[in-house]
Image (spheres, grey):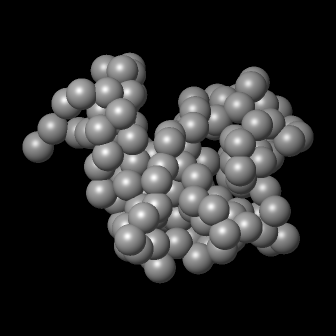
Amino acid sequence: MAPDTLVPLCNGRDLVDAGPAVPFDVVYAGQTCTAFAVRWQGAVHAYLNRCTHVAMEMDWQPGRFFDDSGQWLLCSTHGAAYRPDTGACAGGPCRGGLVKIALTERDGVVHWHTAHNLQPVAF
């Protein structure tokens, strides 16, 4: 698949502001990984589900990443906090920011973008 190909992910209405994420699988740098998409302040964002402190999945329940205030994405294991719009470390034990995955929302559908190191999982 060519870099920057759009891959359909979900209906836009499946992502509620500061609500549950939509998970999806990707191949990142040759390794199959879980990623997630969220909506925050009206815009959609996606990241690898991998904390930068220790490379482990972050959600405290499946698809749950936001703290109680709906302002931060939290790692359930170590409490690292990330900005929902950029993935930048906002506090706690972080080593840089989350790996961002480009999204496009149009005609009610959210798509993610492939890249040279980010591809769909082959079935």
Give whichever of 30, 39 is nearer the camera.
Answer: 39
Q: Quadrant of residue 42?
A: bottom right
Viewer-nearest residue: 16 or 93: 16
Q: Is residue 12 visible?
A: yes
x%, y% of residue 81?
79, 46
Residue 60 appears left or right of 70: left
Q: Residue at x 32, y 46 (%)?
A: 6
Residue 34 location, x and y as percent?
A: 41, 44
In this rendering, is residue 100 above or below 7? above
At x 55% / y 43%, what residue is drawn? 47
Q: Is residue 97 left or right of residue 7?
A: right
Number of marks present in the image shown:
0
Instruction: Tell me the quadrant of the picture where the N terminus can be found.
Output: top left
Between 108 and 66, the residue placed more toward the observer is 108
Q: Residue furthest front?
A: 107
Can you give x and y, in whole percent of width and height, for residue 30 in the image? 31, 21
Task: Choose top left, top right, bottom left or bottom right for residue 109.
Answer: bottom left
Query: Of all residues shown, which one is farthest toward the right?
Result: 91
The answer to whether residue 27 is visible is no
